[in-house]
Amino acid sequence: MTALPADLVRTLAAVLGDGFRTDASERLTYGYDNSRRQAMPDAVALPTTREQVVALVRACRAHRVPVVARGRGTNTTGAAVPTAGGLVVSFERMRRIVDIRPGDRCAVVEPGVLNGDLQRALMPHGLFWPPDPTSADYSSIGGNLACNAGGPRAVKYGASRDNVLALTAVTGCGELIHCGSATTKGATGYDLQRLLVGSEGTLALIVEATLRLTPLPAARRALRATYRDVDAAAAAVARLMAQPVAPSMLEFMDGDAVRLAHAHMLSYGGHCDIPEGVGALLMIEADGDAHTLPHALDALSAAARGDGCLDVEPAADAAARERLWAARKALSPALRSLAPGKINEDVVVPVSRIPALVAGVRRFAQDHALPIVCFGHAGNGNLHVNLMYDPADAAQNARAQAAMADVFALTLSLGGTLSGEHGIGLAKRDFMTRAIDAPTLAAMRAIKAAFDPDGILNPGKLLPP
């Protein structure tokens, strides 16, 4: 039985109809995310309209019941786990693409629309929405906005926050607010839509988003550059980002990641274009039209070369380019061959300090006797540091947590930040006091109180107690 007050249960059942669930098996299904954390909500709401969201928030506020917004649960930080119980609001039924306006280069969508479905709907119009997380085919737009998802294309096109024009959302007071406009310029009051993006459902529940779209490039070409060591690759990243031609993707793999991807591809009978025995690798992509793309590739190839560069090899055709990116995408499943558990942190440092970060991570791997593999979005200085361990082994679990703390401390000492695209959630919440000074945290808490005065929206996430 649910622990919610009986009159609240009656109200929510009346508002939501069959979209209100209290069965234990259904509640369990909505109690976890990709962090592998889990907690049991008291009930689940599956709204289909913004009016239902307004009504359920108002009802929960009257009873001081927590409200946790949920997309498709692909988040890795525990942000969607209902640790305080209460009501999980899953937006899977609010999945309409309300409007596509090619002339204005924008689309209006509900939060439950899957990223991949939106991209497919935009293709006939020659447009795309730039954020492209690895989970695009099964992560929702609302979830992308909640944690400011990015992906490889962010180096040229920006992350979610840079590609949202307007939001309609329900605050913790149960008020419907409209932030921004369907224009690419605006100076009318506070930039609230950008504030809500990345707030992990702690300020308001997004019920509609107007997204900024970009024309699909006519062509794409890729380069694979190999290096003697991480220092040489990082120096190349700095050169690539300093010259006028912006790569559309710039991905980094350390030597361990290269070996792992190579072995994984071959073990599944695939062809692997990544050579063995290199210290680091960059995957570089440019996009544009047929006339300018060759010049862009020449400029990127020249910048990639330098001391420590072993080779710069263009992908011969689209199939070769896809194989190259397939090797990069194979890394996440390949990591499971090292250990059953993974802590995947997405720290960010200034590009010039990537070598110091990777060197420190290697030192932590030795100190804590755990495999740690680095790869990620080098053009933004955003690296995925993957700590591999066995969660069932208490000693390994303790060492993994200590190694994670060391990674965060090193990142901050290098002038970096805790997260580039995964968000804070529970996993990094207790490190926020190290990353952000007390007056700034106080300002964040004041903003939280303005949007959610009773603290019912996703309590315990993002901001430290």
Image (cartoon, rainbow, N blue to C red):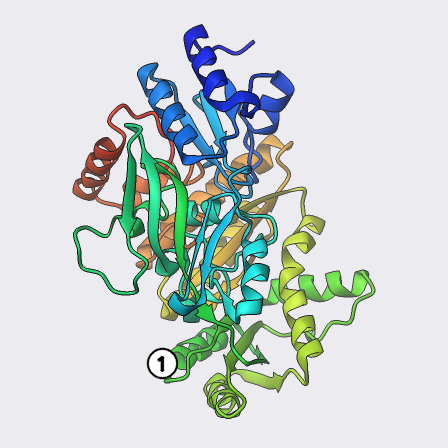
288 or 407: nearer the eye?
288
Which quadrant holds the N terminus? top right
Above or below, 122 relative to 454: below
Q: How many marks?
A: 1
Q: Is residue 184 visible?
A: yes
- Can you give x and y, in whole percent of width and height, for residue 424 in the image? 40, 42
Q: Amino acid at mark 1?
A: Ala
Which quadrant holds the C terminus? top left
Q: Is residue 366 left or right of residue 459?
A: right
Above or below, 226 relative to 109: below
Q: Secondary structure at mark 1?
A: helix
* Residue at point 25%, 65% (across, down): 185
389 or 77: nearer the eye?
77
Above or below, 327 relative to 15: below
Q: Is residue 400 left or right of residue 335?
A: left
- Can you give x and y, in whole percent of width and height, for residue 277 in the image? 67, 73
* Residue at point 45%, 38% (across, down): 427
* Residue at point 55%, 27% (across, down): 31
Circle 1 packing at 10 Å, graded few (<14), some (14-19), many (20+), is few
The single residue placed furthest to the right in the displayed view is: 269
106 or 344: nearer the eye?
106
Above or below, 388 relative to 57: below
* Residue at point 52%, 46% (across, down): 96
Q: Is residue 355 visible?
A: no
- Can you give x and y, in whole percent of width and height, for residue 16 in the image? 49, 23
Picture quadrant of residue 269: bottom right
Determine which residue is flagged by label 1.
242
- Can you give x and y, in whole percent of width and height, for residue 61 in the image? 32, 20
Q: Is residue 69 left or right of residue 313?
A: left
